[in-house]
Amino acid sequence: MTFATIGDRRVVLVAAAAGYGKSHAVRAWLESLPAEARADWTVHDDCDPADLPVPGPDGRLVLISRQPLDVDARAARVGAEQLALSAAAVAERLPALPPALRDRIAADLFDLTAGWPALVDLAAAGLARARQDDPDAPIAALAETLAAPGSPLHGYVAGEVLDQLPAPARAALRTAVLLEQASAALVPELETLVRLGVVVAGAPPPGGFGAWYRPVPLVAAVARVHWPAAAGRREWLAWADTYLKLRLWASAAGALLAAGDEPGCAKILAAHGDAILAAGGGHSMVAVVGALAAAHRSDAVRRCYGEALTQIGDHDAALAELTALAGPAGAIDAGLAWRLGVVHYHRAERAAAAAAMGRGRMEPAPTRDEALLLAWMATVRWSVGELAAGEELAARALSAATALGDDRALGTVHTVLAMLAALRGDRAANDEQYSKALVYSTRAGDTVQVARIQANRVSRLNEEARYHEALAAAGPAVRAAEAAGHTPFVALALVNQAEALVRRGRLDEAERSYTRALVIHQRTGSRKVAYALIGLAGIAQLRGQRSLARGAYEEAVRAAAGHGFLQCLVPALAGLASVLAGPAADPAELMAAAEYARAAQAAASGPLAIVAELAAGRVAVVRGDQPAVIAAAAEVARLARIHRDQAGLAQALELRATVSGEPAEALREAARIWVAAGAGLDADRTAVLIAALPAASAREQLDGALAVARLEAAGVVGSAGAPPVEIRTLGRFEVRVAGMAVPVSEWGSRKARDLLRILVTRRGRRIGREELGARLWPDEPPARVAHRLSVALSTVRTVLDPARRHPADHYVDAAAGGIALRLRHVRVDLELFLAAADLGLGRRDRGDAADARAALTAAARSYHGDLFEEEPYEDWSTAVREELRLAHLRVLRALAELHLAAARADDAIACLLRILTIDPFDERAHAALVAALTQAGRHGEAHRARHRYETAMAEIGVTPAAVTRGG
């Protein structure tokens, strides 16, 4: 919380319901003041609003109460909004749990409590048990369980919150609980509940706007039991009248149903069902119609009910309802035809969608439903790449919508016109049409179409490699789809968000978004599950999980094939071709990869042709077919220019570089494109390729090393073009050849292992044979040592190159001047650690904080333990071990400083704790830890850290520095 706005005011009013931590917050604020300033304040806790103290001429008052206080209009006010915990703070209060469960519990707790501290603490343990017992339980069911009579939470809320409210506020809360969401127009006393934190900001109902509030869910669950009386018919009718005046049709229908007026409810649904659904009222419509007697379900109501079921993702039920209404054959009205066809469209069943829409009957005079039917028919044509047919249908739809002057129809028509413009490569028209669509849909109050437009625009930004903008727009697009309650569009927005996250290098977040979309599509039975599968396969590919990626691509092909769903089929075929044509591909896999690439080329049109041609080019690279590579690169570049696809252009340049005698300029141009696009992983991958070129500059080599560090930190494997031999020395000694650890049995003798370890500690410098022999066999005669050294050297070479693919001195050079490990042919973890550390410290000194953090983070992560941790007493390793240890401490210290400068207190604290694990007497780390914990508001931990600091310094006779105390 903050008291920063108090300034020179003489009265501070702190009001919130019980359990918001009012007294603790005031105490912490006062303790942060200088002693002389603190003495001016007098605190009155648990004040009665009817009997408030008045400040004297020189004194200052803090008044704390569970009820709103209005003693002085000039007073500074602190309420529940400032006292509530953030989502991150809720997570910090949880007990030790597995990370995945902890994240889930934290999100649920914040939703159930709105950050109310006492409720968080009371519900945490019970929620953890409930989630472990039933991971998929809905939030509403969890609230009922946690707030059941007899539970500590129920007793606390009933006794300390509900019974303490003033009578008008109690009546207001009862109404808010019954209505589930309320505004000042419905509940005049709502402001009191808002100030106390008993109700919090919520989303308006379908069609609503302005400030709406909802009771804190756990409070509502207790109140429903504590105050069991329900509203009567008269109250519901009064609320229905208010809703009708506010044009909140879904809420009005629900209120009439609660009042027992089913005919009135059905009349509203029939007259305003389209408006309810356009406003995102699918869930409300399903709930109300589901409770409505069959006699009151007219065809108009059933038609809207089917559309509502589609919105919430219950496609099976939607098909059952709309198919029964349509009958087995014959013409049907346009409104029913497009609604039935849209269900099939969302399931990616192109032929069924076209057949259903083809049954639509056109009347002599245009109607909104006819314009929408034509627009959705054009959308189906777009989905299979039939540009001319799609444009003809869209033109007819535009003519009908324009004649009607119907904003909702115009919004839908301009959306499909934008999609068709992208298919023909006209990005200017694509922008123009989406802008028009957004204006019309917003004016019509069509929040569902607005959500669709926002999601589509993110897709367009991804296609144009404008990933900064795409990611900025992706979050609002997901939230818009969620607010509209349109499940298929939520999944679409999540997939587009995930694509932007991948390009920005945030693979874990992208995986979560793809997985959410996957679950939605699986639950709704949609073949668009292929979108998420393709994304997850791409992430697995980046992480080197080849089998996992292949399986996901194959599943995506099965989902998309046979239905003409080209938007997924082409990328799935192309991805499968790229996986099979990997570095370890055998002839059969290469042949299959070529077949998949040809299939993608045959199916592709418009922008999808870029994906297909890239796949064909990559297969040709592995097969060594240079003419095919050149042709594919040229075609990708041509198509990319037409479709304004900067990512495609960069990939065309990379493809061309694989067969060019002078690849540097093509790779540099590709790198510039990736950097401008904000595609971090791609930019880093290209930087690594440039750094490996013989003509790479010193700056390019440095950038390549930094790129390797970032790629490894992101979990991307194979990014550094790593040689087939890897030597791990930090922690336990291990040699890996072709990705597999060499078992101890293959070494034959310990001395061969020691020989390689000594060479590693020399860091590429030569060591004389005599010196090496003396270290390995100090008690043996020289003649015997020479023979043993030759045998050990032969063993090392055999271990590193078991198939004898290289000359004998490829890995270990044993020339007359001495023996050395050829570092350019092997990957040694200590070399990578030191390179990343030097690079990070250098960038820090130059003021490049972002790059410094990336390199130092990679260095810290790669330090898995001291050098040869299992055998720490060999004299020849002591100096290098100490050098590495000191470098590790420098890295952690610098990283902590950078994190603190960037206000990343938790990351800084983790670094400081790691330092103290290595050196418990590091005074700077102790002092910095106490200060960091205090600044983060973790006063209890700061107090304990201060005690450990003082104890450690006392052991070595040092007086602790004066740092901020935690309390």
Image (cartoon, helix red, strand yellow):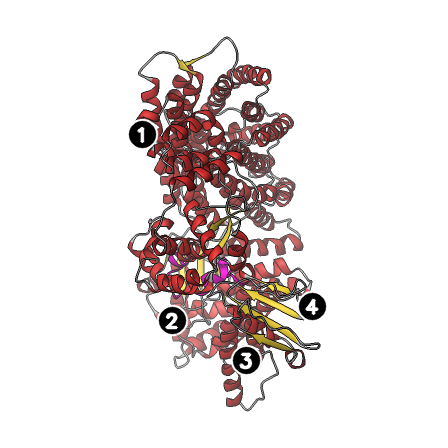
Q: Identify which amino acid the numbered label 4 is placed on.
A: Gly
Label 4 CA crowd tier, 10 Å (few <14, some 14–19, many 20+): few
Q: Mark 2 = which residue?
A: 751
Q: Quadrant of the N terminus?
A: bottom right
Circle 2 SS class: helix
View extreme (bottom): residue: 957
Q: Viewer-nearest of labels 4 and 1?
A: 1
Q: Viewer-nearest of labels 2 and 4?
A: 4
Q: Identify which amino acid the numbered label 3 is placed on.
A: Asp
**Figure label count:** 4
Could you tell which of marks 3 and 4 lies nearer the N-terminus? 4
Q: Identify which amino acid the numbered label 2 is placed on.
A: Lys
- Magenta span includes 99: yes
In screen coordinates, is 579 left or right of 915?
Answer: left
Q: Residue at x 57, y 68 (%)?
A: 896
Disc 4 to disc 1, how far (Cα)? 62 Å
Disc 3 to disc 4, how far (Cα)? 39 Å
Q: Mark 4 = which residue?
A: 7
Q: Mark number for residue 293?
A: 1
Is residue 766 visible in the rendered image? The answer is no
In screen coordinates, is 473 left or right of 288?
Answer: right
Could you tell which of marks 2 and 1 lies nearer the N-terminus? 1
Is residue 553 visible in the rendered image? The answer is yes
In screen coordinates, is 847 left or right of 510?
Answer: right
Q: Mark number for residue 922?
A: 3
Circle 1 SS class: loop
View extreme (top): residue: 364
Extent of the magenta region? 83-102
Could you tell which of marks 3 and 1 lies nearer the N-terminus? 1
Could you tell which of marks 2 and 4 lies nearer the N-terminus? 4
